[in-house]
Structures are given as C-alpha cells and as structure tokens.
Image: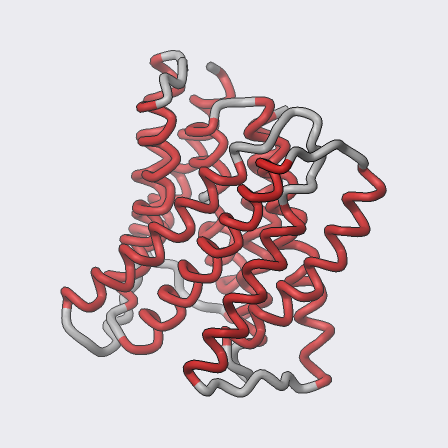
Amino acid sequence: MAIPLALLVALFAGVSDFLGAIGSRTAPAMAISAGAHAVGFVMMVGLGIIVGGSPTTADLWWGIAAGFGSAVGLTAIYTGYAKSRIAIVAPVVGVGSVSVPVLWSAVDGDTLAGQAWYGVALGVLAIFLVSLSSGEGRGSVPTALGYGLVGASGLGFLLVAFGQSSEDSGIWIVAPSRASGLAMLVVMLRVSRTPMRLPKGLWPVIVPVAALSSLANAAYAVAVREGSLASVAVVSSMFPAITILLAWWVWKERIRRVQLGGIAVAMLAVGLIAAS
C-alpha cells in the first residue's frame, strides 16, 4: 500500500499546487498559503478525531517541527520564484528536498533491494528533469541557489519529520504542522508587510487547496509507516509532473521535451520501486 499511497500524495499535492497557482494570480501566494493552513488545521483536527489514533508527545512535536519546515521552505520558494531565477530555483528545490529523506534513509540503514535503489535514483533524476524551467527571472545565480537550497532544506525536513510518526498515531501528526506553519506564515506576513486579507471569491480555491494538501500530508504520514522513507518520499515528490500536466491541459502551456522525458523517467522509476 505504500507506493499507491505515495502516488495519491503526488496527485493531491500536484492538483493543490495548480489550484494555488490559480489563486496566486489575484492574491499574494504567502497569504493563500496561510489561509490554506488555517482551513487545513480545522479539517485535520476533525479528520483526526474520525480516524482515531493515540499520538505520543513526540508525534506532536515532530508535527510542529514539520510545519516550521514547510513555512520556511515555501516562503523561500515563493520569494525565489518572484525575485530570482526560476530555472535554477525549481530544480534545486526538486532534487534537494527529496535528497534529504533519501540521505536520512541511507544513514538510518534503510534496507532496500538494489532494484528499489535504482528506482530511487531514477526518481530523483525525474524530479530534476520535470522541474526544469525556461524562465530566467531576476537576480544572480548564487542568490537563486540560496533560495533553492533554503526551500529544499525546509521541505526536505518536512518529509523526514512526517516519517517519524508512531504506528498508533493515526494522522495526528498533520494537525500540529498546520498550526505551527500558520503561526510562522502570519509572522512572515507581518514582517514583510504583505496584506493578509483574502478576497471572498478566492475561498472556493483555498478550501480545496487546504483539503488536498492536508490529505496529501496525511497519506504521506501513513505511507512512510508502511514502506521505505526513501522510496515513498521520491514517489510522493513527483507531484510537479501533475502540476505541469494540468497547466498544459487547462492553460495550454507548452511542455518542454526535457520535462516529457522526466515524466517518462518518473513512470519507469515508480515501476522499479513498486516491483521491488
């Protein structure tokens, strides 16, 4: 069940990101993220009660830490996209964020079959290829690398943190991550003097963003308890392919050949991991 759940994570996260991109055309992306965190917290508390579980204190602390990683990572990514070179930021974030749990797994003695490790390696390559952008943006190369590395570190830590939930915790690790992420985003909005008020017409977009991103986190937390952290993290992190396909379908955006190659490599990687 681990790999099907990871594919579900990629689907939910990819659609959520696409909807977030729609919303960011009319409101600040950070404010949309804050709204989604607030709605997501309420949703995950309710769903946590329905699903049940007995979280430990450590589960809750790992959830809080994951929220901080998410807030820092997303802020760096959004800022990097706006002020720097997307063509550098995006692939650095894509590969860097998934490299964190892969390295953690290797150090932690994750026992994967050789075929599965080949799949993990191909998956990292696929994420890099799919994330390649033709946009240049502003700023220097070192600045773009800086934003990318900070974003990758934050999201990579989130992937590792969600992998630490105990067997009987249900999905309770997600709710505290929504709360801590919201708190940090509010601070960032205040410091940057970014307007926090969101147009009423945006809530039909924000609610599904919150639901899908929160459900993706919950599915990921369950998946890593049933399978390898490295393989689940890699498959889950293929969500940019979903976002790109949606942009092609809805907005008629052109998909570059290198990105199509990345999608093909991703399919091969999933097959290798699933067959191991």
Q: Residue 235 in the image: state x and y as whole percent.
A: 47, 36
Q: How many marks?
A: 0
Q: Residue 75 in the image: state x and y as whole percent.
A: 42, 67
Q: Residue 42 in the image: state x and y as whole percent.
A: 75, 59
- Residue in the picture at 23% in, 72% down: 136
Task: Using the image as rendered, state which of residue 87 and residue 172 is in the foreground.
Answer: 172
Position above or below: 255 against 61: below
- Residue in the picture at 59% in, 57% down: 15
Q: Quadrant of the N terminus?
A: top right
Task: Using the image as rendered, state which of residue 102 and residue 62 is in the foreground.
Answer: 62
265 left or right of 232 in image: left
Task: Using the image as rendered, state which of residue 33 and residue 167 is in the foreground.
Answer: 167
266 left or right of 250 in image: left
Q: How is the image coloured?
A: secondary structure
Q: Residue 62 in the image: state x and y as whole percent.
A: 53, 42
Position above or below: 239 against 107: below
- Residue in the picture at 39% in, 45% down: 156
Q: Residue furthest front?
A: 57
- Residue in the picture at 36% in, 46% down: 97
Position above or below: 139 against 162: below
58 left or right of 189 in image: right
Position above or below: 47 against 139: above
